[in-house]
Image (cartoon, rainbow, N blue to C red):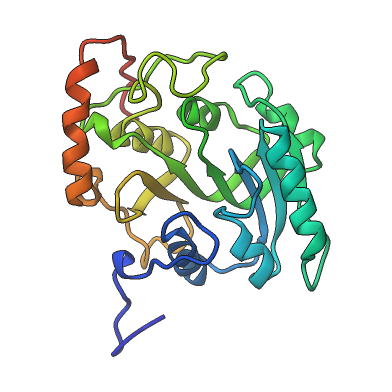
């Protein structure tokens, strides 16, 4: 973990095994600091669970957990894959095929046999991510990896909840929550922002009380520095006058 007696910067720890971008490396870096003694994941919007944020933890570090997705074909594909390449130490992950809403997310989790603390909660559903995390009470994750909408720049805004939303909706940019609004939600849930993927749309939050001294809170502005993030700001112009909610600061 350390090089020349110093801890590497969070931005230097990313690499990809199964994840879409460099989330695998960043997650391992976080868990090397907070300890990997709660090896349970829940991934919402997992597709087939193969190109996912949890597969590396499952196959290489002895985790188990729950993949949730609304696409029956993806769930079938995932079950087949994990059945063909089983975990070398334990049982296969649980798959749940469901259209996730605020109204049903806790029941989906508990009916699959998961409750209380989990190591990782990953949410990527291209839409109501903010509202789903806000609604979750069935589990208390130590680490949350969630997609934000960096097109919204430093605005504190959230697209209103729509239980029937399906991407791309009225406009491919009009969904989700801004990085600032998501970070404010995290604070209300007792978590702090510790970094993001390089392209600055997948944010990493850690529960307060876990490795606070070596995984300090960082500002939203500090992680929105990649040229692609700054270029994305321009997309907001098309929809800046649409309806948004502005949640109160924590």
Q: Residue reaching furthest bottom?
A: 4
Query: Which quadrant of the figure has residue 238?
Result: top left
Residue 129 visible in the shown view: yes
Q: Nearer the viewer, residue 242 or 235?
A: 235
* Apparent side of residue 178 relative to residue 160 in the rendered image (left or right): left
Q: Position of residue 128 (x, y in %)?
A: 49, 25
Q: Is the residue 244 above or below the residue 211 in the image? A: above
Residue at image location 62% in from the left, 64% down from the top: 57
* Apparent side of residue 101 relative to residue 192 in the rendered image (left or right): right
Query: Which quadrant of the figure has residue 186?
Result: top left
Q: On the rendered image, what quadrant is the N terminus found in?
A: bottom left
Residue at image location 65% in from the left, 72% down from the top: 60
Residue at image location 56% in from the left, 14% down from the top: 163
Q: Position of residue 148 (x, y in %)?
A: 37, 37
Query: Which quadrant of the figure has residue 105?
Result: top right
- How many numbered circles does the render carry? 0
Q: Nearer the viewer, residue 4 or 69?
A: 69
Q: Nearer the viewer, residue 172 or 31?
A: 172
* Apparent side of residue 107 relative to residue 240 in the rendered image (left or right): right
Q: Is the residue 236 above or below the residue 160 in the image? A: below
Q: On the rendered image, what quadrant is the C terminus found in?
A: top left
Q: Position of residue 18 (x, y in %)?
A: 55, 61
* Apparent side of residue 63 relative to residue 181 in the rendered image (left or right): right
Residue 225 visible in the shown view: no
Q: Position of residue 107 (x, y in %)?
A: 74, 28
Residue at image location 51% in from the left, 39% down from the top: 124
């Amino acid at each position: 973990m350390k090089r020349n007696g110093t801890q590497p910067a969070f931005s230097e720890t990313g690499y990809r095994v199964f994840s879409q971008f460099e989330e695998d490396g960043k997650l391992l870096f976080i868990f090397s600091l907070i300890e990997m003694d709660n090896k349970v994941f829940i991934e919402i919007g997992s597709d087939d669970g193969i190109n996912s944020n949890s597969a590396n933890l499952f196959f290489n570090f002895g985790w188990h957990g729950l993949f949730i997705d609304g696409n029956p074909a993806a769930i079938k594909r995932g079950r087949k894959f994990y059945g063909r390449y089983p975990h070398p130490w334990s049982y296969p992950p649980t798959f749940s095929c469901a259209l996730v809403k605020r109204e049903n997310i806790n029941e989906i989790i508990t009916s699959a046999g998961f409750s209380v603390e989990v190591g990782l909660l990953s949410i990527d559903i291209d839409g109501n991510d903010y509202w789903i995390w806000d609604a979750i009470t069935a589990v208390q994750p130590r680490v949350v990896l969630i997609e934000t909408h960096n097109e919204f720049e430093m605005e504190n805004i959230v697209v209103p909840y729509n239980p029937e939303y399906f991407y791309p909706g009225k406009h491919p940019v009009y969904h989700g929550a801004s990085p600032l609004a998501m970070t404010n939600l995290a604070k209300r849930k007792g978590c702090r922002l510790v970094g993001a993927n390089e392209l600055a749309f997948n944010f990493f939050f850690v529960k307060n009380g876990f490795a606070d001294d070596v995984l300090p809170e960082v500002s939203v502005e500090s992680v929105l520095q990649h040229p692609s993030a700054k270029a994305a700001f321009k997309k907001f112009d098309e929809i800046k006058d649409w309806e948004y909610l502005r949640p109160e600061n924590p």
